[in-house]
Amino acid sequence: MREVAHTTPLHSEPRGPAELVRSFLPILYGCDEHRPRAAASRHYHPDTTFHDPLVTVQGLERARRLVYVNRTFLSDCRMAFGDVTESRRPDGSHVVMAEVKTSLVFKHFLALRPWQALVGDTFTYHAVHKVVLDQDLKVTEHEEICSVRSVLDSSPLGRVLYGLVRKLNHACTSDFGYTLNQYIAGDRSVRTIF
C-alpha cells in the first residue's frame, strides 16, 4: 500500500465564522487596489449594515464605497488579533466578537501636513469588531467599537488632552459625584451649583 502525504491547500477556505472573520478583516481594511472591494462583495450580504463611531452605511454598494476611503488616505494598515469569540443565535446566525489592534499609516498630503506634524502619520487604536453572519456565512451586520482611550493615546496631542481630563476628574470629589447622583435620582432637596 502506498502512502500519500496529505497537505492542505495554500488558500484553503476558513472552517468557521471566527476563522472567516480573521481571514477577511485584514483584506477589507487593507490598502490594496482591488482585493478589499472583492472581499466585501464576497463576504457581505446585499442588505448589510456597517457601523463605526463616525459613520453608518447600509447596503453592499455603500459598504464597498467605504472601502475606498482606506485606499485613498492610507498607505498601510496592520491588524493584530487578540481574543476572538463566536456564538450562535437561535435563528441560526453567528456572532463573532474580535478584539483587534489596528495601526493605520496615512499617506502624506499637503493639506494634512500640519495635522501629521502634531499627531504623526501612524494612528493605532484598539477596537472590538462585532460581526453577525447569516446561515450562509454572509455578513449582515458589522460594528466596529473603538476604545476612546486608545484613540486618545495614539497621538501626543491626544495624550495631553486625556491627561487634562484625568486631572479634572481627580479634582472632583466623591461628594460632588454623590450629590450629582442624588440630584439626577430626583432628590430636589439637595442644593447643587451647576
Image (spheres, rainbow, N blue to C red):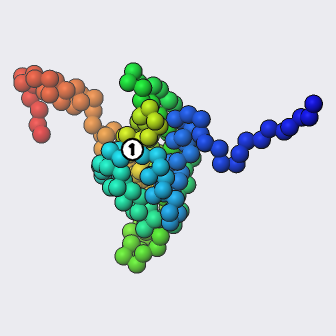
In the image: residue 112, left or right of residue 178: right
Q: Can residue 164 be seen in this view?
A: no
Quarter holding the C terminus?
A: top left
Q: Is residue 61 above or below residue 101?
A: below
Of residue 169 and residue 119, the one placed in the foreground of this image is: 119
Q: Where is residue 15 in the image (x, y as percent from the top left)?
A: 59, 35
Which residue is at 6% across, 22% downward?
A: 189
Q: In this view, does 156 lie above or below 178?
A: below
Q: Is residue 140 visible?
A: yes
Quarter holding the N terminus?
A: top right
Q: Where is residue 14 in the image (x, y as percent from the top left)?
A: 59, 40
In the image: residue 22, left or right of residue 138: right
Q: In this view, does 186 lie above or below 6?
A: above
Q: Residue pushed farthest left?
A: 189
Which amino acid is tagged 1? His
Q: How crowded is mark 1: few (under 14 residues within 10 Å), some or many (20 or more)?
A: some
Of residue 10 and residue 74, the one placed in the foreground of this image is: 10
Image quarter of residue 111: bottom left
Of residue 90 and residue 164, the one placed in the foreground of this image is: 90
Image quarter of residue 190: top left
Which residue is at 33% across, 55% downward?
A: 62
